[in-house]
Each structure stands twice: as C-alpha cells, then as structure tokens.
Image (spheres, helix red, strand yellow):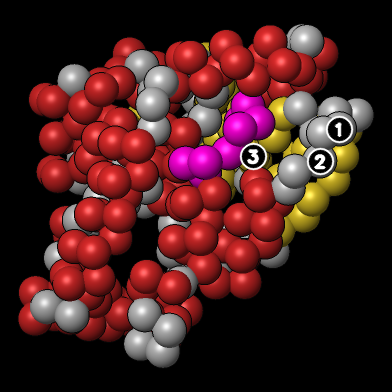
Amino acid sequence: MIEIERDGAVQRIRMNRPDKKNALTGEMYSALAEALEQRDADIRAHLLCGVPGSFTAGNDIADFLAMAGTVGIQDAPVVRFLRALATCEIPIVAAVNGLAIGVGTTMLFHCDMVFASERALFRTPFLDLGLVPEAGASLLAPRVMGHARAFELLCLGEPFDAARALSAGFINHVVAEEEVEARALAAARAIAAKPAEAMRLSRALLWGERADLRARMEEEIRLFAERLASKEARAAFTAFMDRSRGSD
C-alpha cells in the first residue's frame, strides 16, 4: 500500500507492500498520483521510497490485466500516475533499496535526485511481455544515458546494478543499504530549505520545455494499448502468468 507522511516540508511517499515486492496495483497508482498532484505550498520536496529489498517490482500483472480489460489503459490509474510525474513542479528525490523493475526504473528518469543502495537492481522487461517502454523513458533514457545504453536497458532488458546505473547517469549516489533512505531524506530536506520560487524556476530551466515529453508519453500510451491487444503480448502474458502460478 502507499503510506504518506510529512517530515517538515518533505512529503515522504512510501510503497509498502513487501509481501508482493511492492508490485503496484491500480489503487496504489491512484494514491501515488494523488500525492504528486497536491498543490500544497508547504510541500517543497517529495521523497519516493520503498521497503528493504524492493523499491517496486513494477505492475501487479494480474491487477493490471484486469484493469486494462475494463477501463482501458488510457484511463488507467497507472497513466494518471505517469502524467502526474511528468507535470510535477515539486522536486522529487528517490531512495532505491532493492528491486526497481519496469516502472520502478522508468519513474526514476523523472526524479531530480536518486540514491541507491548497493543491492539495487534496475530492469525494464517491457519487450519480454510484447510491450513498449512507458513513462517517457524512450525519450528521457537516451538523453541521459545515450542511445546504446538506453537500448540495452529498454529494448534488450539488460539488468543494471547500482554501479552501472551510476555510470550511466540515471542515479546520483550509491550508498550503504542502511544509509540510503537517510541520505535521500537529507537531500530532500536540503532541497526543501532552499528559496522556493528560485528552486521552482531553476528546476524548470533544467527540465526545459516539456511538451515533447508529454507528446512522447501519449505516443507510448497509444502504442502500449495497441500492444496489449496483440497476439504477441497475449502469448507473453499467458506464459508469464503460467510461470507465476507454477512458482506459487
């Protein structure tokens, strides 16, 4: 589930479903989106975190497929969350301690600072499921990492450990497991302590015009929806669910 708490001007947003490795349900996506959509002037930084061993394992596949079959992907809570990420005007810091799979990795490209423990593992198995990348990652990852490494991460689905993620430039610091959340919180507090309007303007300058990002995200959403209905994706999801049932 999603737990929200305040630490002064920092809003800490914790994914806390350890029995499922923080796999995200529609209800959890809605709570995440609501937290990022807040227009509270007293919130000057967000801190995204998980639990020891899991930032998030990505979508809860069973929940995701059930939702996609009823409301459609364009109106799904996950899409609301992705749009909230792309339009959030408040700095976002992440603390990653363990698995960051699928959206667990792609959401980090929207963060301003990312701290990871040595046990962090980043992977985006979209193509293995017959899908395409999401969260604007097809635009942001090549900008940050270069095409070659972005292709490895997003198309080949190669796992990146913390050291390689640091070298690729999509995390800021690798720290000891017992320190990762404290270090991320300290950074969020430092951000929150800066002059608020100067921070907002400076961050906007660094991000630049986001119309291209929003357009790319909408294109990804359209293609994702098409791929979900494809024979290739249906076969991949069936195989995944069969493997999951076999491991229970």
In the picture of the structure, the residue carrying the numbered disc 2 is 40
Magenta span of residues:
85-92
| Neighbour tally class for label 3: few under 14, some 14-19, many 20 plus, Cα within 10 Å | many
Res 178 quadrant in image:
top right
In the picture of the structure, the residue carrying the numbered disc 3 is 48
Give residue 126's position: percent from left, percent from top.
24, 56
Contact check, label 2 and label 1, Cβ < 8 Å: yes
Which is more foreground, mark 2 or mark 3?
2
Q: Is residue 85 above or below residue 70?
A: above
Is residue 111 shown to the viewer in this render?
yes
Which is more foreground, mark 3 or mark 1?
1
In the rendering, which numbered label is found on residue 42?
A: 1
Disc 2 marks which amino acid?
Asp
Q: What residue do we see at 39% from left, 32% from top?
A: 210
Q: Residue 149 or 76: which is nearer the viewer?
A: 76
Q: What residue do we see at 77% from left, 55% from top?
A: 3
Asked if the stretch drawn in magenta spans residue 182, the answer is no
C-alpha gap between disc 2 and disc 1: 5 Å
